[in-house]
Image (cartoon, helix red, strand yellow):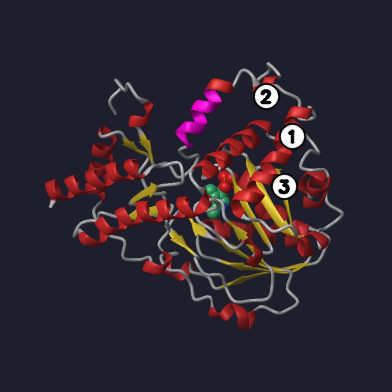
Amino acid sequence: MPTDIYDPREVVNFSAWPAMLPYECLKELQENLLNFKNTFCSILEVSHRSKEYMELNTETQDLFREVLNIPGNYRILFAHGGASTQFANIAANFQGKQWYVITGDFSERAYKEAQKVSESFVWKREVYEIASGKESNFSQIPSLEIISEWIQKDSTYVHITDNNTLFGSTLFQLPETDVPIIADMTSSLLSREIDVSKYGMIYAGFQKNIAPAGTAVVIIRDDLYEKLEEKLPAMYSYKTLVDIDSLYNTPSTFNVYFSNLVLKWIKQLWWLEVVEKLSRTKSELLYDIVDRSNGFYNNAIHENNRSITNVVFTLGDWGLEEKFLEEASEHWLVSLKGHKKVGGIRASIYISMSYEHVKRLANFMEKFQKENS
Ligand SMILES: *Cc1c(COP(=O)(O)O)cnc(C)c1O
């Protein structure tokens, strides 16, 4: 990669996680870092019990509520440890029958963590796997029709992974069931409009669309809140976190601060409606080239399930892919290598990435194809 970069915006970072953050928010952070809300301390130093931080905490929850249109019967909390920590926490926080739809690597991890909890805890939990796409190596979304037939009515929840970050597929439609749906939306929350009232619980690690890594936002409907396990160590207990306003211990104040900036930035963009249109337009730009070309391939994922945040494709030849990655980085298009379990190329195009950024990749792909066909 060239080292004489004069404008950091020239670099387009397609990393899946941690990922690109909105330039405007980074600039604002840079300008205000040393003086958080006129405390003349930086956000990295102020007390989480200070009036200023407490206000920020409440304001950020309100912003999530406003931007995602979260109804009044849902509670919002910030948990430590990103999304993977929630995999085990969810299973521990609820008793009874728990179902897992396996559409990719993270779904499988969530299921395995729940299994461990069910095996090691003294409370009764039954953990089941349903509709696994493992046979096709997750290249296809499994049929979800069996869900309404199989899941017993008295189950506590069914867990889904909204967007399959490694393979680039998304469950745009929810399974039909009266059992509460818990959704991992780590790589998709804030990228499109959703009807929160259709979910029992939504959670997302921060580091894709929201803020730096290490925190998760958890949104719980009242009926599931009522079912939360009481006898858990405080830091694992969603009940403790809700009841104490996510301030049991020292929260990740910086991450909450940054998510606040991002949510305000989304409001300036005229909300999720616009963000969704942008996300769709950006991903279509790339899928269109893949479909028209005879050199980039994404045959596996059904059109209706193509992710709008992680565009995955191959060049059918490992040597050519190496060349593609090398030349892309010469054009300052970086972190395009697919996950090692999937291979190929992955362009993660979360909300921070502009249309112009994606267009640069599109132009490069067309040029590369002409030169190598
Ligand atoms: C990245 C990702 C995770 C893991 O998030 P961490 O915060 O690193 O634990 C979990 N689920 C999905 C869908 C992801 O994309």
**Mark 1 lies on residue:** 55
Residue closest to the eye, 59 or 245: 59
Q: Which residues are magenta?
A: 21-30
Q: Label 1 amino acid?
A: Glu
Residue at left offset 45%, top offset 70%? 135
Q: Label 3 amino acid?
A: Leu
Q: Is mark 1 within 8 Å of ligand 1?
A: no
**Mark 2 lies on residue:** 37
Residue closest to the eye, 338 or 241: 241
Asked whether the residues under the numbered discs 1 and 2 touch, taking CB atoms below 8 Å apart as contact, a structural biologist would say yes
Percent x, y of residue 54 = 76, 34
Q: Earlier in the sequence, mark 3 or mark 1?
A: 1
The verdict on residue 52 being magenta is no
Residue 212 in the image: above or below residue 319: above
Q: Label 2 amino acid?
A: Lys
Q: CA distance from mark 1 to mark 2?
A: 10 Å
Pointer 2 local density, CA inside 10 Å: few below 14, some 14–19, many at least 20: some
Q: Nearer the viewer, mark 3 or mark 1?
A: 1
Q: Earlier in the sequence, mark 3 or mark 2?
A: 2
Using the image, tell me which numbered label, if any, was put on residue 77. 3
Could one spot residue 85 in this view of the protein?
A: no
Percent x, y of residue 76 = 71, 50
Asked whether the residues under the numbered discs 3 and 2 touch, taking CB atoms below 8 Å apart as contact, a structural biologist would say no
Q: Earlier in the sequence, mark 1 or mark 2?
A: 2
Label 1 sits on a secondary structure element that is helix
